[in-house]
Image: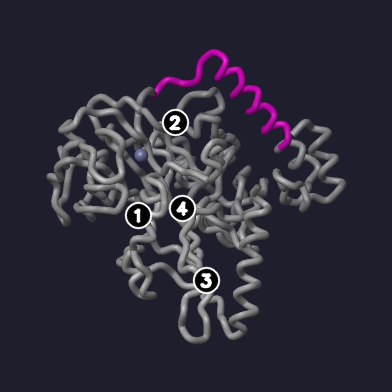
């Protein structure tokens, strides 16, 4: 199914290229202040094209507006033949010209995911060394973020050691999105400080105790989630790719909506699909979004405190019933809000704890082996296993990874 999609895309591309030999592929950065409707206007495309999408996809279209790179195929006479505009890290809007007019659809972004292990000895600082040695600034930021609650970075000295196990998406030879750290370790003053990610998306210390991140408050006093956060997944009944960049919370019409953290209101108004929306910009490049409101209270430019009432729940936009859609973004990328909403500070228990400890032991064993045998850091492809040297592949298979 997926492959035929790309063959079709390629075919469209080729066909278009034959008929428009002088057509050019253009890569640009999306202007933050431009909505998708305004983009359509630029090429004299009727904005009613958005109505051809289903409700969920219309909401996704309103998320276009961050500074992402996007691609256009433009004919020599300036006519837009095709454009691919990313929505988050997983999906993209595909706008293309056919003989019957323009069509719009949401399709997955093609990428490859590799698992890396990096073992570094510190020269300057963990952050600076990750950038200079691994050429990955986002990885450096993530490493600092996941370890900052269990390590004092000021005590780090030259020749201290760091280990990172992480997944990195790659597209056209470039890293795509934020690396997903599975294990982070900093060895300082002879003490190893480990952090592990569990399948719930949260980080825990070696004993399975939760690490308190900078948690946000709940956007409603009583939070009952009716639809969870998902990045792309294939919908078996609708036969299309879907994503839900936020959580839906059950709430009677008119329930007060609370600011999840201190911040500045950067949007208060109507957004296609999401109806009446408030967006709040917080510290550390976090942004929260509160959709489908019946009444907006907070105004653009206003500073709000955590827990302050910013509006009231409703059913505006493309919504089937009164509820709050709550979204969380970091640097313009959707992340699961549950990651930052505090429910419990307890560690893992029962089966979760057992599974966590088993997984932890496996990771530590492999890291130890790499250290002992002085292997270079490597790339291990979890999807196709094509980048692995044959020797390496057997090596990891033998260790049950
Ligand atoms: Zn929703």
Bounds of the magenta segment: 345-366
Q: How many circles with numbers are drawn on the protein?
A: 4
Q: Which mark is residue 211?
A: 2
Residue at mark 2 to residue at mark 1: CA–CA distance: 34 Å
Instruction: Label the magenta part by its dominant secondary structure.
Output: helix
* Residue closer to the observer: 393 or 26: 26
Q: Are marks 4 and 1 in contact (CB under 8 Å)?
A: no
Residue at mark 4 to residue at mark 3: CA–CA distance: 30 Å
Is 335 a magenta residue?
no
- Tell me the residue at 45%/55% (across/down): 87
Reading the image, the residue beneath label 1 is 62
Which secondary structure lies at badge 1? loop
Q: Is residue 169 visible?
A: yes
Q: Is mark 1 within 8 Å of ligand 1?
A: no
Mark 4 vs mark 3: in front: 3
Q: Earlier in the sequence, mark 4 or mark 1?
A: 1
Q: Residues within 10 Å of mark 1 (few under 14, many from 20)?
A: some
Reading the image, the residue beneath label 3 is 99
Q: Are marks 3 and 1 in contact (CB under 8 Å)?
A: no
Quarter of the rendered image showing ligand 1: top left
Q: Are marks 2 and 4 in contact (CB under 8 Å)?
A: no
Q: Which mark is residue 88?
A: 4
Looking at the image, residue 281 sits to the left or right of residue 26; the answer is left
- Tell me the residue at 82%/43% (across/down): 393
Residue at mark 2 to residue at mark 3: CA–CA distance: 56 Å
């Amino acid at each position: 199914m997926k492959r035929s999609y790309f063959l079709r895309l390629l075919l469209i591309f080729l066909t278009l290229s034959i008929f428009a030999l002088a057509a050019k592929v253009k890569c640009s950065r999306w202007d933050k202040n431009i909505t998708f409707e305004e983009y359509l206007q630029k090429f004299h495309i009727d904005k009613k094209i958005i109505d051809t999408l289903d409700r969920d996809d219309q909401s996704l279209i309103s998320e276009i507006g961050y500074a992402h790179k996007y691609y256009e195929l433009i004919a020599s006479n300036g006519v837009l033949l095709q454009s691919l505009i990313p929505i988050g890290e997983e999906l993209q809007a595909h706008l293309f010209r056919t003989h019957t007019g323009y069509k719009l659809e949401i399709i997955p972004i093609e990428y490859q995911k590799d698992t890396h292990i990096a073992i570094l000895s510190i020269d300057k600082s963990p952050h600076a060394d990750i950038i200079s040695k691994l050429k990955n600034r986002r990885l450096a930021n993530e490493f600092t973020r996941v370890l900052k609650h269990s390590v004092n970075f000021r005590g780090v000295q030259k020749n201290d050691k760091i280990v990172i196990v992480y997944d990195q998406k790659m597209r056209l030879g470039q890293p795509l999105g934020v690396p997903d750290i599975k294990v982070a370790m900093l060895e300082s003053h002879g003490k190893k400080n480990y952090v592990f990610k569990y399948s719930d998306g949260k980080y825990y210390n070696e004993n399975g105790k939760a690490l308190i991140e900078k948690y946000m408050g709940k956007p409603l006093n009583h939070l009952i989630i009716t639809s969870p956060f998902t990045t792309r997944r294939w919908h078996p009944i609708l036969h299309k790719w879907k994503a839900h960049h936020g959580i839906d919370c059950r709430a009677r019409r008119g329930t007060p909506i609370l600011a999840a953290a201190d911040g500045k209101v950067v949007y208060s108004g109507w957004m296609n699909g999401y109806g009446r929306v408030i967006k709040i910009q917080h510290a550390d490049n976090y942004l929260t979004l509160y959709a489908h409101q019946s009444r907006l209270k907070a105004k653009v430019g206003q500073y709000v405190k955590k827990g302050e009432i910013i509006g009231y729940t409703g059913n505006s936009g493309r919504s089937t019933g009164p509820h709050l859609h709550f979204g969380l973004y970091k640097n313009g990328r959707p992340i699961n809000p549950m990651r930052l909403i505090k429910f419990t500070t307890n560690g893992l228990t029962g089966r979760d704890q057992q599974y966590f400890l088993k997984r932890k032991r496996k990771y530590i064993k492999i890291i130890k082996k790499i250290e002992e045998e002085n292997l270079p850091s490597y790339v291990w492809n979890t999807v196709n296993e094509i980048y692995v040297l044959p020797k390496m592949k057997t090596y990891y298979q033998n260790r049950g990874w």
